[in-house]
Amino acid sequence: MMSIRRQRGSYASERSPGAVSPELPQQDRVRVETVRTGVGQDLILAVVADGEGHPQAGESAEMVVAQLFEGVTRSRDRDLNSVLRGQLEDSGRFLMDASISGEGLGEVALTAIAIWRDRLFYAQVGHTMAVLVREGRAIPLTGVGDQLLGSLDPPVIQTGDPQGMALNPGDSVVLASDGLTRVSPEDGKPFVHPEDIADYVEGNTPLEAARHLLSIAMGRDVDDNVSVVVVQLPGGRARGGRGPVTISAAIVGVLLVLALSVVGINWLRESRIPPPPVDYGYAVLIHGSVRVDKAVEGESIGMVSNLGTIPAGATLTALNESRLALQTTYEGSFDLSATSFYLTGGSRTLLTILDPHPETSSGDQLSLTMCTVLDLISGRLLVVRGEGDREIQVTVEGKTISLIGFGAGVMGFIAEDGTYAVDCLLGRCLVSVVHGDPIELIGGQRQPLVEAKQEDVEVISEGILQGWDKLCGLCLSEP
């Protein structure tokens, strides 16, 4: 993750391996910086590259990106389109020669942009893309080519007007690898539809926009690497009205907590009570709609839909079957993005703590403090952890149940019609009790929560298992 702001514009990048086999390496490369050319042009230079055709194609992509940045900073040619095209041509010849000699490391698709004096220059080859976001519209700047850098057939390198494309105040440019918009084999729809990109970018900072786009693709189980760069010119309008809450509100809350912690630091030292954790987590509504009745400091939000974001501390009611994916703004966090949860219609849940980090923790201690905590008030809640060892706690009827251990884990919770129970569907679950030792469950076991006694553990019936499986889109079924 990277985010920075300059007077001429702000930018951010994010990338994820997606839901690919863990044996396969990350083949995408992304880089965005403010650089100066050999003739003194100060510009924003951004690149997304995608290697293909070899297990080490990512290394080829990294080499091409590095050479492009070096070439641009050394160039004394003021025609930036020509400079970008020349760098791609040189890299293409190098990769092709390596392939012919038998030392090839795959081929590379790449999109590069340079913004100088509010004018956009670009060069593109293959299936990476650039999109201009302007006044609510997503305007494609590049097409899709079949040949990549390094292919035996010379690729078609696209460039724009030699004078550059004029950008308006508030314009954003999005670069992405094809994993963002490729068609899902499950339903035949793009993981993120290109026409919808503007909805997720406008009104957000570049970092929020990049993370939002990535969250949506990950929430739909994208099966490829995904890389995103968002560059935004100053002068855009902030999101107004009573629409979905963005992470900006959560960041304000973070700053407030930081300020309060500084004021009270002497008292905290004297009393030996650690300062409260700063919560960097938020939820992205992947599908469905929810009503947020209360958020941090009692703020009323209203209805959230259309892939809106919800901060930690919010109490929400699902208006229909809904899925939320958890994300974080903390750079060093682990495993949170592998967590999502599902609600049946009418269920109420408090997002108590999503991604806390005590201020006093050093970098190597933060992983010890990470714990996601939800409170099911009523209805049914299904929690799914796809990987990692993040502990997830859910409180139901005064009992705390934790998903522990490493790897995939699934817990279902019921708090309706006088029934309070946890179904440990996958992994290991720990039920805390007032007296005695905690009760540990394994996949396939149910624990009623009124008394929570070891002897009351039940085997989950096939009908109950199928109900949970349907709620999460068959996440429990054998592949």
Image (cartoon, rainbow, N blue to C red):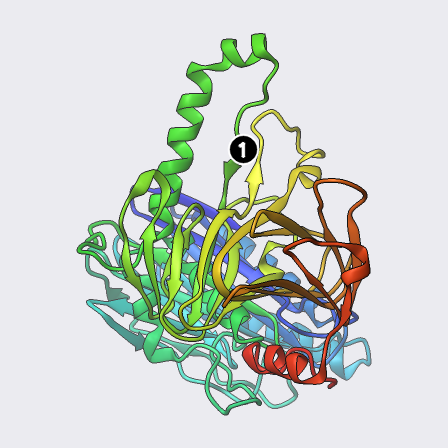
Residue 296 visible in rendering: yes
Q: With 304 as the anchor, is 84 left or right in this view?
A: right
**Judging from the image, what secondary structure is the residue with disc 1 in?**
loop
* Front-lying residue, 220 or 290: 290
Residue 300, image x, y percentages: 26, 49
Query: In the picture, residue 218 is in which quadrant?
Result: bottom right
Which residue is rendered at x = 64% and y = 67% of the image?
A: 17
Give the image location of residue 255, x and y in percent.
39, 32
Measured from the top left, where is residue 461 in percent x and y?
72, 80
- Place of residue 252 in the rendered image (x, y in percent of width and height, measured from the top left): 35, 38
> Circle 1: is it few (<14), some (14-19), or many (20+) Cα within 10 Å?
many
Front-lying residue, 167 or 290 = 290
40 horizontally vs 382: left or right: left
Instruction: Quickly name the residue at label 1.
Output: 277
Residue 89 placement, left or right of 315? right
Q: Residue at x 51, y 49 (%)?
A: 2
